[in-house]
Amino acid sequence: MYDKIFPPKKIALPNGKVVIEKRSPTPLILLLLLIGVYFSVQLTGFSLPVLFERWDQFFVIILDMIPPRWDYTSHIWQPLLDTIKMSLLGSVLGSLTAIPIAYLASNNIVKNRVIVGIARVFLSILRTMPTLVMALIATFIFGLGTLAGTVAIFLFTIAYVGKFLYEQIENVNMDAFEAMESLGMTRVQAFRYAIFPQVLPNYLSTSLFCFEGNVRYASILGYVGAGGIGLLLNEGLGWRDYSSVGMILFMLIITVFLIERVSEHFRKRLI
Amino acid sequence: MIEFINVEKTYGNQVKALQEINLTIEQGEFVAIIGLSGAGKSTLLRCINRMHDITGGQLIVDDVEVSSLKGREIREFRKRIGMIFQSFNLVTRTTVLKNVLVSLVPELPFWRRLTGIFSKEDKIKALSALDQVGILDKAYIRVSQLSGGQQQRVALARTLAQNPDIILADEPIASLDPVTSKQVMDDFKRINEEMNISVIINIHHVEVALEYADRIIGIRDGKVVFDGKSEEVTDEILDNIYKGQMEKKTMIEDKEE
Amino acid sequence: MDTIEKQLKVAPKNRRYIIVVTTILLFLFVWSLTALSFENMQESGWSIAASILTGIINPDLELLLSFTSQGVPYLLVETIAIAFLGTIIGAIMAVPLAFLSASNIVPAPVAWLTRLFLIMVRTVPSLVYGLMLIRVTGPGPFAGILTIALVSIGMLSKLFVDAIEDLDIGVLESMTSIGCTTFEKIRYGIIPQLFSMFLSIVIYRFDMNLREASILGLVGAGGIGAPLIFAMNAYRWNEVGSILIGLVILILIVEIYSNKIRGKLVRG
């Protein structure tokens, strides 16, 4: 298609040989990108002058956060622990639920294409839904509070771990599976003993990685009333109580950092 | 013509990598330098295009005193000397042609150097170089998709596009299998004979060296212990080059790299 | 025999380790169960769930297909524009930070400090940036762009650093032998190596930013999030349905294409 619009160029060498050089798509891509930037700027009202004039406002807020309000710590503990509990619970349940769904979505194990298709579409739709939107819907169904947040994280974890797991399962060496099936095991049993051990380390590592990310996501879920530390952040920012916000962020950063370190330690051991 | 007169190379902590080197290499010679790894082969080669500085004596390439060159002069000087490496040293993520064109970059006007847009003449130069090593059909393929032998030929084409008088090759076939090694060595031989380019090659495959080179230089512990025609090389000479002082080998090896 | 004996010695140790870790995990799991409270859950929940489902099955087609500035297509384009500009700005800011945190380029303390800074930037939730930036630009998509830029920096620099630390230095040696200047070595030795990797990383991040941009409306930073939350709060479920359908389709399409392009970039 592209070659027809921009026909390849012929280069003749002194010794008579001819080389055909395809036109580089780079200039066209650059042009399209520039057009994209131009229209995006028009559409969103992006303005460099405003940015240059008022960027310092951002740092005014940050400076207001320093020093953080240390005595606010006592208010933070409970919601912070809630946030961690929500993400832990959602991640554990989500990664466990992901196993049967990933099983159904692997086309080398389940031969029924309809089931595979349904499982995959289900995972895709779950994955595309932003976590916050899921949390918002969950608050309508499960009421305000940590339950809604846990459900949102649970669903996101299924989608993330599920997709990763079925891709892993499909790339696995099938010899052992076939051998065990020929020994008279059922497909599920053969899966349990032949395939699961092969994908287990990666599965655990992905689940841990997902948990890391979930702690970060969970911290904003409170914004839509789904429990955790987000509610306090929202209040603090709304009342312009920046020193409290600073304290919350400070504790959040330390928590996330510690969780990342621990999880990274275990992930390195796994692989 | 390359002349070494009492050349000496000492690394910082008094390690003598080269000493009392006296050699004359005429234009158009095919020379193989053999010796144990760590004997100083690589250092000797890299002194010629001033990738290493010598610490004593004189090194003269085509009437130019190499150690007297400065900054810009060094870069000008290097344009006439091509170099081939064991690990090919190509940008594997771009096409073969772009890799060859790199050797023309120093000659380009600034805007072309900045944008990387090459003129048709330059492309023809690069393509002709690829034709000379027989991989013209691979010009628009990414280097990462080529075999090791083909990659070494790309490196050779890059050097040829530079239009050099001398090609220095540092273990060019060490990472290749015997069949592709032979093809690459045939390329070197042909280039040497047809274009009268001097080829100086570091190599640890003695049989290959004897088969292709006109002249062999044996190095041991930073000194030239043999210099003569390939036909003159006997088993005793090889023993002297390689086994002369076996016990010292490990020591020097540690120090050089 | 030797290896079998070794295995025998290794096995119990490993098992004890697994038991300890599992126990800790179980303990944490039970502990986290205490966060759940079902008291806020009302009977009405299930009927709401049912109406959400009906809303998604019977979307407001007029909204879904209308090309006015209230219609879903317009809002989606605005969301794309926010993610697009935000990703570009974020990528531009991430490049110098990545070089500053690459341990093979700058001294260790500088790299370490930059990394610490990046962790901090990464941990602050996007909505917090959104609320802060609204004070700079006023509500609207402009604030959204800056937010997306800030949240992208952390991950982008981290992935850029991996690419930088994988650089093949051998090319530079051969360029020295050709007689290239430092500028030429960077332009023809380093940039070609990094460019396709960086581009692939940026496209991946754009994919994520699209999701990110779709929620920024919740704090008034433009995009499709604000109409979504208004429709929800007003219980107009068929509007919610049409917005969600539009969003899911868009994100899926972008994901498929971005995967294709990235595959091409990395494998050639």
Image: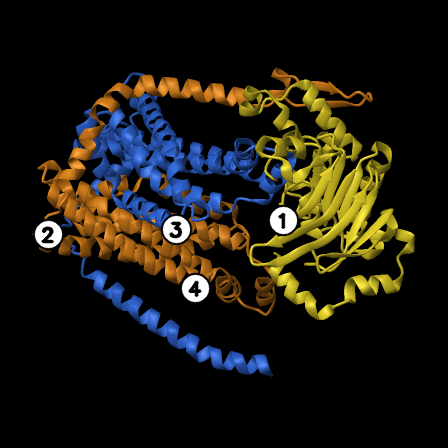
Residue B82 position (above or below residue B228): above
Q: CA distance from mark 1 to mark 4?
A: 50 Å
Chain to which mark 1 belongs:
B
Task: Tell me residue A2's x, y (percent).
Answer: 60, 21
From mark 1 to mark 2, how far is it between C-alphas?
A: 64 Å
Q: In terms of depth relative to the viewer, which is nearer, A10 or C253?
A: A10
**Mark 1 and 2 residues: CB-CB less than 8 Å, in contact?**
no
Numbered label attached to residue C108: 3
C-alpha distance separating marks 4 and 2: 37 Å
Q: Which residue is mark 4?
A: A269
Q: Examine the rendering and report whether any part of residue C194 can be seen.
A: yes
- Could you tell me which secondary element the residue under label 3 belongs to? helix
Q: Which marked residue is nearer to the observer: mark 3 or mark 4?
A: 3
What hue represents chain C? blue
Q: Quadrant of the N terminus of chain B?
A: top right
* Measured Cα–Cα span from mark 1 to mark 3: 33 Å
Residue B156 falls in which quadrant of the image? top right
Image position, residue B86 (x, y; %):
69, 48
* Residue bearing the label numbered 2: A70
Q: Nearer the viewer, mark 1 or mark 2?
A: 1
Name the chain under label 3.
C
Mark 4 or mark 2, which has the lower sequence index?
2
Instruction: Identify the amino acid type marked 3.
Output: Ala
Question: Looking at the picture, which amino acid does disc 4 mark?
Answer: Arg
Same chain under badges 3 and 4? The reply is no
Amino acid type, label 2: Trp
Please report the residue visible at 30 percent of the width from the left and 28 percent of the height from the top. C145
